[in-house]
Image: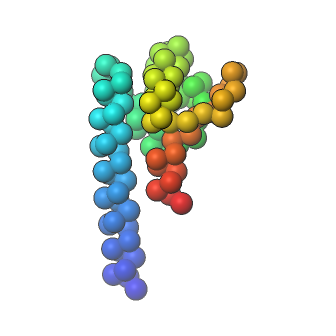
Amino acid sequence: MARSMENFFHKWFVLEYDLYEEDLEKASALVNSHHIRTVVNVMFQHPIFTAKQMAALTGLPEATVRRYLNRFEEQQLIFSDGRMRSKTYYYYNLLDQLR
């Protein structure tokens, strides 16, 4: 039983690491900034977020965060609830892994 749990967590970690590397590469191609790793790290820690929350967690200006998130949404790296104000973003790639 312990061995099967160990195998499960190992597989999950590998999948999550692969997803992180793949999406970091995609995000870096969309936004030319040395802050992009910080944004992706926060997306992994908080897969449901607002631009305001992302700005607070990264220390980046909210306008910069919104620009990044708009690019990510255009390329379907993240999705939003479609609202004009207080838009909530969803990092479905990670949420799917957690299901």
Q: Position of residue 42 (x, y in %)?
A: 45, 36
Q: Position of residue 83 (x, y in %)?
A: 69, 27
Q: Residue furthest front?
A: 75
Q: In the rendered view, would you say 70 is above or below 9? A: above
Q: In the rendered view, would you say 15 is above or below 4? A: above
Q: In the rendered view, would you say 63 is above or below 50? A: above
The C terminus, quarter of image: bottom right
- Quadrant of residue 8 in the image? bottom left
Report whether 99 appears left or right of 32: right
At horizontal 45% and vertical 36% (from top left) the residue drawn is 77
Looking at this view, is 29 or 21 the one in front?
Answer: 29
At horizontal 56% and vertical 40% (from top left) the residue drawn is 90
At horizontal 35% and vertical 57% (from top left) the residue drawn is 15
Q: Residue furthest bottom?
A: 1
Report whether 70 appears left or right of 87: left
Looking at this view, is 14 or 71 the one in front?
Answer: 71
The N terminus, quarter of image: bottom left
- Quadrant of residue 3 in the image? bottom left
